[in-house]
Image (cartoon, rainbow, N blue to C red):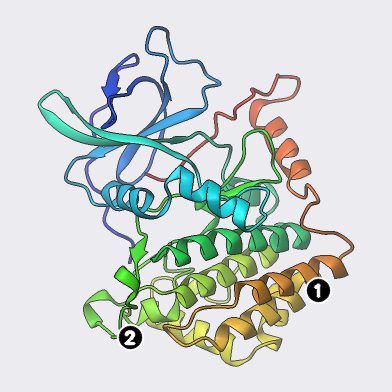
Amino acid sequence: MPPRKNKLPALLPEGFIVNDTSKKSWRLGKKLGQGGFGLIYLASPDCDRPVPDDTAYVIKVENYQNGPLFCELKFYQRAAKPEDVTLWIHRHNLDYLGIPRYWGTGELNYNSSSYRFMVVDRLGTDLQKMQNNNSGRLPAKTVMQIGIRMLDVLEYIHEHEYVHGDIKAGNILLHSLDASKVYLADYGLSYRYCPNGKHKEYKEDPRKCHNGTIEFTSRDAHKGVAPSRRGDLEILAYCMLNWLSGKLPWDHSLRDPSTVLASKTKLWDDLPNSVIKSSGEKDGCQGLAKFMAEVSLLSYDEKPNYADLRRILCKALYRMGTSLSSPLLNSLAQSFQKQSVGGGKKVQKYSPLFCITA
């Protein structure tokens, strides 16, 4: 099950100055949003003037004793330093890698309470809002494109000993200026599956059964097994099926995790027909079924062949007459922005709809 929501931190005033561990100062602007654990503010390194609405930074603030932000910080510090991400992009000939950039962290005190904060890139709207705005579904071409970009991210974090564990549309964000770029955010549930090169053992723990977001969590997680690389890929498969069809076969059973597990097991046992039947979407379902068939062969501690998985989705794109480089999300993003700000109003450079789940 998802972690319980804790008491949110106190609202900090606009203009509040914080100092990160590298002694860099940041000025807080307006509150952008909140999640189950914390608040999100506009931020700027220019502390002498109010934070502009089009700033490129946000600060996430949580109560000091909360776990998710601490977990996310450890992920960034161990596995996603900006220089490491840049090196990976160059070595793997990528145009970008969809991990929000980390700029700093620190602690602050306000009204006798202690808080932890993290500074990251400000991005655009999340994919869940796009999906909701498009009658609950996404075009098959878009689904394949996002799947490939998520594989790029997962390969990187897996190679750095981490799994994400909570892939879903609400945690996938669009670049504020280029809707063909998508980013996997919120590493508050990330897990170090292979500390110092030693993979965690497969062990079912009844106390941890059904952890994660019930719609998308892996069959291993339903059984209380620690997250793994194959688990991340399974979660991605459920997301893609949901994006294609707007629903999942177990949507009406979410209050009964055991029934959800049984339904997920049946989906995998009956490939490829189960995907074709569930999606109702001819374009893309064949590629997704092949993707899932490849994932189904993985053992718990086996390294996936990311190149083969990408090829499967790229071939699906090719059959649809397009490619990864096509700006498939731009038309959806423009339509969403127009409806969000109202007809005739100017769309800001940076979307105010940013939300990293805190």
Residue 321 is at least partly visible in this image: yes
Give percent across and percent down for residue 217: 44, 71
Inter-mark Cα distance, 2 to 1? 36 Å
Residue at left offset 51%, top offset 82%: 264
Category of crowding for the residue at label 1, using alpha-carbon neighbours closer than 10 angstroms: few (below 14), some (14–19), many (at least 20): few
Which quarter shows the N terminus?
bottom left
Label 2 vs label 1, nearer the camera: 2
Residue 12 is at least partly visible in this image: no
Say what secondary structure mark 1 lies in. Answer: helix
The residue tagged 2 is 202
Q: Quadrant of residue 272?
A: bottom right
Residue at left offset 26%, top offset 48%: 70
The residue tagged 1 is 282
The circle on residue 111 is: none
Position of residue 24 in the picture relative to residue 173 (left or right): left
Query: Is tag 2's residue or tag 1's residue first in the polypeptide sequence?
Result: 2
Which quarter shows the C terminus?
top left
Farthest-out residue, top: 48
Give percent across and percent down for residue 39: 34, 35
Figure check: 275 above or below 179 = below
Q: Quadrant of residue 42?
A: top left
